[in-house]
Image (cartoon, helix red, strand yellow):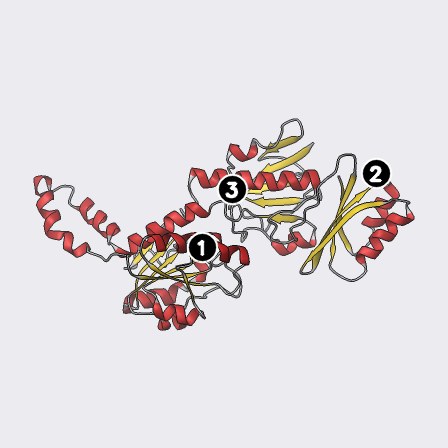
Amino acid sequence: MYKIQTLNKISPKGLDLFPRDNYEVASEISNPDAIILRSFNIHDMKFPKSLKAIARAGAGTNNIPIDRCSKEGIVVFNTPGANANAVKEIVLAGLLLSSRDIVGGINWTQSISDKGDEVPSLVEKAKSQFAGCEIKGKKLGVVGLGAIGAMVANDAVKLGMKVIGYDPYISVEAAWRLSSEIKKATGLETLLSEVDYLSIHVPLMDKTKNMFNEEKFAMMKDGIKIINFSRGGLVNNDDIKKALISGKVSTYVSDFPDASLLGVKGVIPIPHLGASTKESEENCAIMAANEIKEFLESGNITNSVNFPNTNLPLKKGIKRVVITNKNIPNVIGEITSILAKNSINIIDMLNKSRGDFAYNIIDIDQELPPNALKELRDNSKIISIRAI
């Protein structure tokens, strides 16, 4: 019986994928085999020895201590692309909100609710102060062309925008998803100097924190509109406020507002609604559940952020051992020697590495005997071992 702990409200469409005859799923559960969460912060959480995997029902994993998980042999999954359409749609809404002063117009209209029959005439007189511009024909810069960035770029083209994309780490798969009408920027500076709108789609890491700051704003056209549905820390709040006051930036749409941005003219603060749709939550939950289920039952890894994707079909009647280890020389030799010493024949084997860590799937012709299991666990180079 596998135990799954949920640390946020997870869509039943995902949790229902765990058969109740083989899985126990609850928010309060001791010694879980896996955890499924959304935004719950577990950096200070002590992990039980039983924990084998954590799945984030979403793309960002800032709430998970990845390095510590890797050192403890805990595989961390995310769900890339599952919420991409939801975020793409709200980014497009952000483009329109930044172009037409819809928010200001709504707020002003609400303020004259006590004017009775005068409202229609007052509206006609005041509407010009909320006039904006159209996005058709304008240049949009998309920084980061992963699942969401590519969808934003493609749909912006369909809306008549001229789109320039920049992503020095774009994968071949992602490149295939892009419309042929999207211009590829030779560098970030070039893109920033050309565009009327900027949409940010990069992960928050040490090297991207405050990526958009006073220096980058100086490269931009006056009056640029910036849309950020990626992460708040990518934009320096003090510098963006200065840029808004000077007119260098006309509008900043942020899905990650903090107190310093509230009430600032030109800021449209949205309360982290990017992936907050029923469909997105269902898609993320389904993907996370499938990742956990496949890993626990077969040892296969898909969409891990700390261990390599590894897939070896599990054949009926074959026993399987999965091992995480330090990515240093001769570990595989030591593992196979221990198995050979115990007269265990290897039927099939797959070894992959990622950074400082490696993952092995080993199919054998018999149950792993206790003495072989103990010898493997006693090896200081091996982090975790599990017989399936």
Badge nearest the viewer, 1 or 2: 1
Residue occupied by mark 2: 367
In front of the other: 97 or 182: 182
Please state, as top left, top right, bottom left or bottom right, where the N terminus lies in the image.
top right
How far apart are the alpha carbons under marks 3 and 1? 19 Å
Task: Give residue 62's position: percent from left, percent from top.
Answer: 54, 53
Q: Amino acid at mark 1?
A: Ala
Task: Report crowding for label 2: few under 14, some 14 to 19, many 20 or more residues within 10 A (C-alpha).
Answer: few
Q: Quadrant of the C terminus?
A: top right
Report if the CB atoms under discs 3 and 1 are less than 8 Å apart. Answer: no
Q: Mark 1: which secondary structure?
A: helix
Camera-side residue: 211 or 161?
Answer: 161
Which amino acid, by three-letter code, is at mark 3?
A: Cys
Name the residue: 69% across, 60% down: 356
Q: Which residue is mark 1?
A: 150
Q: Where residue 324 sits: x, y (%)? A: 73, 51
Q: CA distance from mark 1 to mark 2?
A: 47 Å
Q: Which of the marked residues, 3 or 1, is nearer the chain's N terminus?
A: 1
Residue 284, disc: 3
Q: Residue at the location (54% across, 48% down)?
A: 41
